[in-house]
Image (cartoon, rainbow, N blue to C red):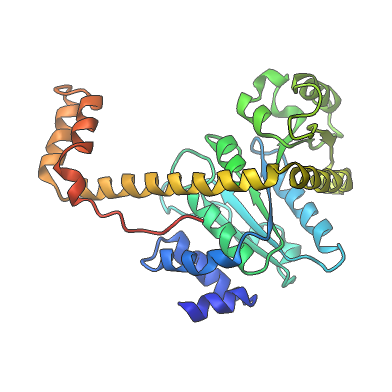
Amino acid sequence: MESLVEAMVRGDTMSLARLISRVEKESPDAAEVLRLASPHAGKGYRIGFTGPPGSGKSTLVDQVTVALRRRDGAPAVGIIAVDPTSPFSGGALLGDRIRMEQHYQDEGVFIRSMGTRGGHGGLPNVAQRAATLLEASGKEYVLIETVGVGQTELDVMDAADTVVVVMVPEAGDSIQTMKAGLMEIADIFVVNKSDREGADKLAQEIEASLHLGASATGWTVPVLNTEAHRGVGVQELMDAIDEHRRVSEESGELHARRERRRSAQFFKTVEERMVAALHDLLTSDGDLRALVGRIEAGEIDPYTAALDVLGGRWLSHISFSGPGGG
């Protein structure tokens, strides 16, 4: 395993792909992979893109990737594209090959699609771990595109150093249709497809809804117009990302955000493993299955039953082995 991780750290793409697959499939050695890779991570800058389906996030990520690769030194870019998971196959409905085809001949860009899995429609925990591996492999930027529903607003806030919320005029008649969570987590707002009717109105409504003035960190959330398919407004977005990074670094917010990311990953991993272990126990413990039956029949309330499980003998039977955080 050490040799495979060492090869990944040297920039070997095949090793990176194999290790992400092991972590994504929660192989027995996934925790060891992350333990070996984590010391090499932490230097990349993570940019999250979220918003309603159909807002053009993939096209915007594609344009941002082009802009990054054209910079001095051609910084390496990793892309994690989170797609809805098929309820039948468990895999992502949209594959790597469909997205951003122009980058497949570029050795400095690595693209990986993964499903939401957990069912809440947000960012899967494994995406954070994949981002750790991308950073360890030398990617200077990691772009994370989410499906934009469910728990995404909380998940992407934990995952990214800069959060870009992408909206489109047809997303709704007014700002009232936007989830409050998206308003709270955006570092940058983008009104994409701004050549369409209603774009200016949407941008004005977003600006009016934002808290006026700079935040405690000194950052004022900008609202930008783009036409991603034509590259219009992309340079302004790049400038805003760079400026947010500068302000975050100088204010200490970037360091604080990364501290919160690590603690969030710890708690998410503990929760993930406990839930998985409890489900495993349900298949092997007749008494626990009987307790669930009593809950379903209304003979005991779920709260009391949960406390009974947490304080009872079942915990000693649970195995919490599994992959670590990222």
- Where residue 247 sits, quadrant-wise, is top right
Label count reads 0
Q: Residue at x 38, y 47 (%)?
A: 270
- Where residue 156 sits, quadrant-wise, is top right
Q: Is residue 292 above or below residue 322?
A: above
Residue 173 appears anywhere in the view: no
- In the foreground, 148 or 102: 148
- Residue pushed farthest bottom? 3
Q: Give the percent coordinates (x, y) of residue 228.
A: 81, 45
Q: Give the percent coordinates (x, y) of residue 64.
A: 79, 53
- In the foreground, 262 or 12: 262
Residue 25 appears anywhere in the view: yes
Q: Give the percent coordinates (x, y) of residue 118.
A: 43, 44
- In the foreground, 215 or 224: 215
Q: Give the percent coordinates (x, y) of residue 89.
A: 42, 54
Q: Residue at x 24, y 26 (%)?
A: 302
* Quadrant occupied by the N terminus: bottom left
Q: Residue at x 36, y 66 (%)?
A: 28
Q: Residue at x 88, y 48 (%)?
A: 235
Q: Is residue 22 above or below residue 310?
A: below
